Structures are given as structure tokens and as C-alpha cells.
Amino acid sequence: MSTLNSLVSVIVPIYNVEKYLERCMDTLVYQTLKDIEIIMVDDGSPDNCPQLCDEWAKKDSRIKVVHKKNGGLGDARNAGLDVATGKYVAFVDSDDFVSKEMYENLYNEAVNTGADTVFCGNYQYSHGKSTEGRRNLTERKTFKGNSLKDFCLDFVASPIDVKTDWKYEMSVWHGIYSNEIIQEYDIRFRSEREVLSEDIYFNQLYLVHTKKVSYLPEAYYYYCDNNNESLTHAKYDSSRYTRMLTLYQGLCDLTIERDPHCMRAKRCLIAYMRGNAYKIIDAHFNHSDTVHYLKELDDKNVWKKIDYPIKTLEFHSFIIAYLQKHGLENFLILFLKLVEWAKQMRNK
């Protein structure tokens, strides 16, 4: 890696986002923090994104473009890390966008507190509308020492006595990371084609080397869920099950010294088992295929290994885990559809 010469390097993986790229880039090139570099990684995009990347680079000298063969989100982020020269590194999904003061505020927080990493809240943005910001915290908080060890585990999943599965947003796009730590320990993303959540895995590789983390309550990142063709969105298929198990085993390996019984990794797996059951229902497969995919998630040999007190989960989460654990797919289908119907009624 070359000498660090920017304050923040913003890595933007790009694949099939022609419709959203200008919106994303406008919020980056007009950041109030001017001393940044923007690394556009064209991951073999089949649309006009490769040409658009080159056009952006001509407009702004702070923009670098990396063209590469398609390798997926994690591989694209790694390609950006290979050329990043900023003191801090940030990640933005190209169908999302950010507040124009995001990186100035996060960078100033890092300088003022001496933090290796700074996170913030985010907005859910769907079809042109923002929901209330997801803040996780009501006031700024700094983690170091033992509190940082707990915080690191919280990025895997919540402890047993917390009802929500995650206390904090575990994605990498709502923070800035020390590039020195990343390069010193050669921290890179595993492919999402190998593990279901490359973000959780990356954070566990990274956070154990930090000495201080700051978390701001303000929401600066806009996470958009209306692009089903991007690198970060995909329909359900059987590979998701094996990638869940790979993630689970990897998280056990990374956390076992701090969490000897891998309770956080087990809770993470249970949460993903539930989330993917919903994905199967939302995919509107025929009944036979729906049952087939749910049976994969209900593998009794796997559930026997998940020695977790599921009664401590939120009520609907407990019901789903119970039905999965006991292989009651038809009851599970009815319950999931009932939950979805109730959500629709509340949203009317």
C-alpha cells in the first residue's frame, strides 16, 4: 500500500446500479470533508456503469476507478482496500447514499476522541421515502477496554438478556475504519459467496485489534432496499444455507476465546435461520419447493448443536425457532404468513 495521503478513502463497489450511481456519487463528491479519495470499483458491471465510472474520474481528481472481473461484493471491497491511501476507510454500497456531512463528522469524532473507528446511525430508505433514523444509541458512547470486548461480541449478536438480535447495526457501511489496522493485519473480506454475512466476519477480524471505538447517535447513512439487482440483494437459494453454516463456524472460531460456548454465534445463526425462512415465504415458491427449502433450515442435526435457550427470545422469534427446531414446516408456513399479514395490516 502507498503512503497514507488522504483523510478518508471511500470504497464504492459497483455492479448493475446505473439507475442509482449518480445519486450515490453526488453525496460523495460534495462531502463537507474535502480531503477524501473516492474509489469506484467496477465489479464487471454489465450495464453502463464502467463508462460512468470513467466519466466521474474525469470530473474529479479525487476519484480512482478500478475495473475488474466480477467477483462479488467482498472481492470488490478488497480491490478497493488494495489501493486505499486514506488514514481511515469507509464503505458505501452504490445503490445507497450518505449525508453530505457524514465523513467530516465521523473524522472529527475520531480525531477528538482518538478512536480507531467511528460508527453512526442510519436511515432506512425505500422508494423515495425515509423512515425514522435507526440510532441504536441516544447519546454518543465510547468503547474501550472491557466494554470494547463486549461491543465486539455485540456485533455478532446480542447477549441472552437482550430481546433484539443485534444491539447495533453490524454492517460496515455506517462507519470509518483505521486503514493502518486493516493493512497491518492484512484484514480483508471473505466472499459473500462463501459466508452469508461478510460484514459480520470482517468486523470480528478488525475490532479485536482496535483500542477505542466511538459510536454517534446521529444517522448519516441512507440504506436503500429498492434495488434487487445490486451486489447486496439476492433472492433465496440453497447456497444461503451452507453460507449460513460457514459463517456460524467461522464466528465460533473467531470468538471462542471471548465466548467459550459460542452463544453469540448461535444466536446469530438462529436469527439468520429465521430471516431466511421469511425470504423463502417472500419468494412465493410453490408449496413443494417452499417445504423443501424450509426443511433445509430445519435440519435436526444442526439444531441439536445449537444449544441455545430459545425461550429467552422475543415471542414470535421463539415460536419460529421452536417450529424450525422440531421440523414443523407446515405450521411454520402458516405462522410466517400470519406474521406477514399482521405487518401489512399495521402498515395500512
Image: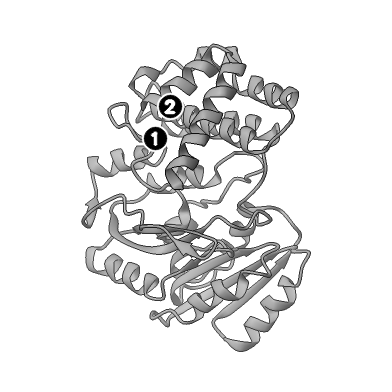
Which residue was labeled with disc 2?
317
Give the vertical position of 250 relative to 95 (above or below). above
Residue 157 lies, in percent from the top left, at 39, 35
Q: Earlier in the sequence, mark 2 or mark 1?
A: 1
The residue carrying pointer 1 sits among few (fewer than 14), some (14 to 19) or many (20 or more) residues within 10 Å by Cα, namely: many
Picture residue at 56% right of the left edge, 21% below the top:
332
Task: Say which residue appears at 67% left-offset and 43% top-offset.
Answer: 235
Position of the N terminus by quadrant: bottom right
Is residue 100 rendered to the left or right of residue 241? left
137 lies left or right of 84: left
* Residue at point 55%, 42% (across, down): 197
Instruction: Give the percent coordinates (x, y) of residue 292.
Output: 71, 22
Label ID, residue 209: none
Which one is in front, 323 or 74?
323
Per the image, the residue denoted by label 1 is 165
The reply to whether dot 2 and dot 1 touch (C-beta < 8 Å) is yes
Q: Nearer the viewer, mark 2 or mark 1?
A: 2
Image position of 225 (left or right of 290): left
Q: Amino acid at mark 1?
A: Asp
Residue kind at label 2, given as amino acid type = Ser
Observer-nearest of 169 and 235: 235
Kind of element beneath mark 1: loop
